[in-house]
Image: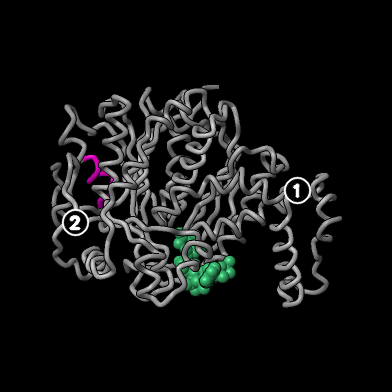
Amino acid sequence: MTAVGIDAVEIWTGKLKLDLPGTFAPEKGDDPEKYTKGLGLNNSSFPDAYEDIVTMGANAAHRLMERKGLSPDDIGRIDVATESAFDNSKPVSTYVAGCLEQVYDGDFHHANKGERKFACIAGTQSLDDAYNWIKAGRNRGRGALVIATDTALYARGDAGEATQGAGAVAMYVTEDPDLVELSTHQGYGSADETDFLKPNQQFPSVDGKRSIQVYLARMREALEDFESVAGASHPDQYEYIPFHTPFPGMVRKAAVLGYRHMIRGTPIEEELAAEIGELPRPEGFAEDEDYQEAIREYMDALSDTDAYREWYAEAIEPTLSVSREVGNWYTGSVHLARLSALRDAAEKGTDMAGKKLLVGSYGSGAQAEIHAETVADEWDEEIEAIDVESQLDRRYDLSFEEYEEVHDRHNHEKQTELEPFTTPDGEFVFDGWGRMNERK
Ligand code: CAA
């Protein structure tokens, strides 16, 4: 059976940044440690005046095509995953193709184009679509371009304002991939939920605290469904576990639940029981307050054990490094977590070929998917070729007043004029709603 998976990845961050503890927290009257320690964020990325989801997606895709020496003929499918689309008819992939056709000989007339929407999980769903298309033998030797692009903005004053971000991840999905191989080992947890919605509105109506509980509930279901296909998971089975990361503090909560689930019936469970006691069992309803409090105490104690800390430091912490610096990229976020993990492995010189990743994707509304990936032989060359640091470093550092101007510029109802803070450098730029984006 031919391996199918992600052959190459490139990212494009919005070219502005907001320092959360240094600039945002003082204006909001917050303790900076709420951001650095509580939410786990240092900075958020924002799009400059001439950037939007199309330009960020097209720029990430162009960078990927250039590095891999691809032409439009190599691409049989372009899927854009986004929850920030501005057009209810044309998919964002048509705009992206329009940009790319300006710089390549040939066109994408042969390519099937679409747009996937299911909040942040749509990037992973597009990967699944690409995998199925290739496995079905319909790709005629071509690969699929999957682009996850979002501007994650919340209304000013909403609690979610602390967790904003903007950027795109472009992935090329092929046979015999260089980065990771996907498989049929996947599981879902899905339910009709109303904690995070955008019914015909740009900024979400969100019940933040409930959204955290829904994330955890769907992720737990997805893990159980995954295990019904792949067998019981063990913490040591996976080198890294990249999760959807709306903010790193969310992953801290998901990780301890995942770990507790994975140690069931293992010697680790017995050893920890001697140290922190047994997992409390509900005597009445699981919603009972005393039981919930007992569970919270147990989970706190578990996350304080050496066994857990060691596992977290190796399998989870390294997945958060890019997210800490860019905030929430919605559809791109879990793919940044995978990239962060593999960058960590490359820095440490770990031989990852053949090793496994467990990837936890999530979209509000709500659905979680857990799937396993196997790292491909050429992963390290691919990771070393991706430029992340210089993209992060060259962002313009916004003052609070400038941040508010940028927020207004990208507010679809305001769309205020704004002088850019940076200069385009051989990239696609946004030139007004509905008009063709140009390369400058
Ligand atoms: N030092 C250390 N920690 C501090 C602190 C300090 N001085 N002050 C606060 N904290 C901690 C808090 O204890 C809390 O951590 P715990 O949850 O572990 O207790 C954390 O910092 C955040 O503090 P608050 O809960 O007081 O923050 P908040 O009321 O401003 O709301 C939020 C936080 C609910 C995440 C809000 O930012 C929000 O609504 N975000 C958008 C929704 C979201 O991201 N939900 C995630 C799940 S949904 C999803 O994943 C899809 C998606 O991409 C949106």
On residue 140, the disc is none
Residue on which the image places disc 1: 263
Percent of width and height locating residue 145: 35, 36
| Chain part drawn in magenta | 90-97
6 left or right, relative to 424 = right
- Residue 364 among those drawn in magenta: no
Which residue appears at 86% of the width and 55% of the height? 274
Which residue appears at 72% of the width and 52% of the height? 261
Instruction: Tally the marks.
Output: 2
Percent of width and height locating residue 258: 66, 52
Percent of width and height locating residue 114: 33, 45
Pointer 1 local density, CA inside 10 Å: few below 14, some 14–19, many at least 20: some
Question: Label 1 is placed on what type of residue?
Answer: Ile
Q: In which quarter of the image is the C terminus?
A: top left
Question: Label 2 is placed on what type of residue?
Answer: Phe
Which residue appears at 57% of the width and 30% of the height? 350
Front residue of this view, candidates 190 and 254: 254
Write down the quadrant of residue 185 in the picture: top right
Is residue 397 depicted above or below 297 in this figure?
above
Q: Is mark 2 on a helix, strand or loop?
A: loop
Write down the quadrant of residue 402 in the picture: bottom left
Residue on which the image places disc 2: 421
Q: How far apart are marks 2 and 1 (CA)?
A: 50 Å
Front residue of this view, candidates 363 and 300: 300
Write down the quadrant of residue 98 in the picture: top left
Residue 88 visible somewhere in the drawing? no
Q: What element carries label 1?
A: loop
207 left or right, relative to 399 = right
